[in-house]
Image: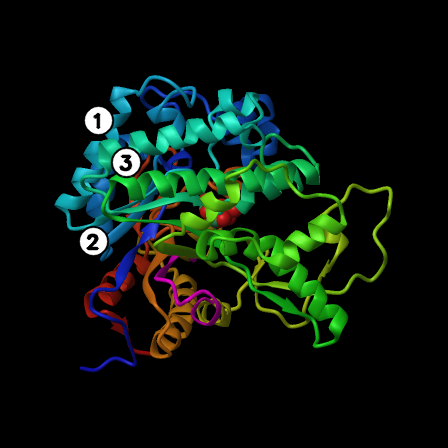
Amino acid sequence: MSLNFQFPENFWWGSAASATQTEGSANGSKGKDIWDHWYQTEPHRFFEGIGPNQTSDFFNHYKEDIQNMKAAGHNSFRMSISWSRLIPGGMGKVNPEAVTFYNQVIDELIANNIEPFINLFHFDMPLELQEMGGWENRTVIDAYTNYAKVAFHHFGDRVKKWFTFNEPIVPVEGGYLYDFHYPNIVNFRKAIQVAYHTMIAHAKAVQAYHEDQDGKIGIILNLTPSYPRSQNPADLKAAHICDLFFNRSFLDPAIKGAYPEDLIQLLTEHDHLPVTVSGDQELIKANKIDLLGVNYYQPRRVKAKDSLPNPNSPFMPDWFFDNYEMPGRNMNPYRGWEIYEKGIYDIMINLKENYDNIESFISENGMGVQDEERFLKNGRIEDDYRIDFIKGHLKWLHKAIEEKCNVKGYHLWTFMDNWSWLNAYKNRYGFFSVNIETQERTAKKSASWFAELAKQHGFND
Ligand code: BGP
């Protein structure tokens, strides 16, 4: 039987998760990260007061979870290592218990024919390093490079796909501009420095990997295409500046080895260039990625500003654009994010045309829904909306592949319901639901649909 939407046989089907969101930080021995600390100091910030201490208890359930991944058709799975578990405090001694834990998980995945993709940093700065200024401080770059080398050394023999960072712009936005991550600072100058140092840390990890390992290394970026309200030059300019700040600030140095000239010019005009040291430019240029992970949830729609920014307010990217609420947009009302399936295709075409058609994959895409128990039927959540969401995006991805985009896989966010930062367990994203009292996992309808999809390498619609 031929399928309407046939994907290549070796396409990567799977899902993604992160250490802080799944392991349970109270499990095993682990140093503190910023989430443990923030939860202790401001628990009211977290939905229903639920913090990172238990989450979905992957630490104790990983064997069962990997069997479930297998049942849901996974041939690959992306997880992250917790820096503060592997090296409590972020610098110094390696925690042997953590080495054993990650070895067991990696071996279990491989034994079940699921390729582990490992990410080194998913929003979880060790607390001690944050207290030294986090990414503002170049000493933290050295600590990160050492951590990356430790991880390559212990796991690189079996793990052949590595990622330096997941969505590195998010800790910049959350921690230094818009107050939704610790350390809750609002300061553009610091934000730029943090973003820049993250990129230096990234380049150093890529360098260390290429010097001594034989797999691929990349970065995972949340690419949010910036669509202008109209073709009016002021709207176009607003969209262009947004793209510079939120996409190209990481995309260009990671793939092209250099920052966009327009971004440098804009920051120069406003006297906000980061502090650099000699050799940085060469480092970035010499250490480009092999593979790009693309997280795509929602587009960004922008328009020219309706009024001039208040000169007494702190300098912000938003001085250059207003967000545009397009009439008739299709919303996921629970998360408050627009669903725009074609965005995935536009991203791929951009990578093909402007980024040398770099090898990439969809490293996150997914739909968080509140109160999913409403859809329970005979003990199973009938999440047809999630299946439709995945299909809708895969159709556009399929078209991108037909047009020769170099995209190799699709990972859903996420494997099982997990702890979503400030939203805790409000919106559920998984193929498997998790009862957080009993830790019981139950497959949703999407799990068996996805297994069939992976088995047939495609679907009919
Ligand atoms: C991405 C993150 C994930 C995940 C997801 C869903 O930005 O990489 O960690 O959480 O978004 O978002 P949220 O949990 O905020 O609903």
Alpha carbons under labels 3 and 1: distance apart: 14 Å
Is 49 placed left or right of 29 in the picture?
right
The local secondary structure at tag 3 comes to: helix
- Classify mark 2: helix, strand or loop: helix
Quadrant in the picture for residue 459 = bottom left
Separation (CA) of disc 3 from disc 2: 29 Å
What's under tag 1, amino acid-wise?
A: Thr
Q: Which residues are magenta?
A: 351-366
Identify residue for label 3: 152
- Kind of residue at badge 3: Phe
Give me the disc on residue 100: 1
Q: Nearer the viewer, mark 3 or mark 1?
A: 3
Left or right, residue 146 beside residue 180:
left
**Is 236 situated above or below 294?**
below
Q: Nearer the viewer, residue 214 or 344?
A: 214
Q: Residues within 10 Å of mark 1 (few under 14, many from 20)?
A: few
Q: Earlier in the sequence, mark 3 or mark 2?
A: 2
Whether residue 324 is in magenta: the answer is no
Between 361 and 390, the one lying in front of the other is: 361
The residue that label 2 is drawn on is: 71
Above or below — where is 300 with respect to 426? below
Residue drawn where x is 66% and y is 65% of the image: 239
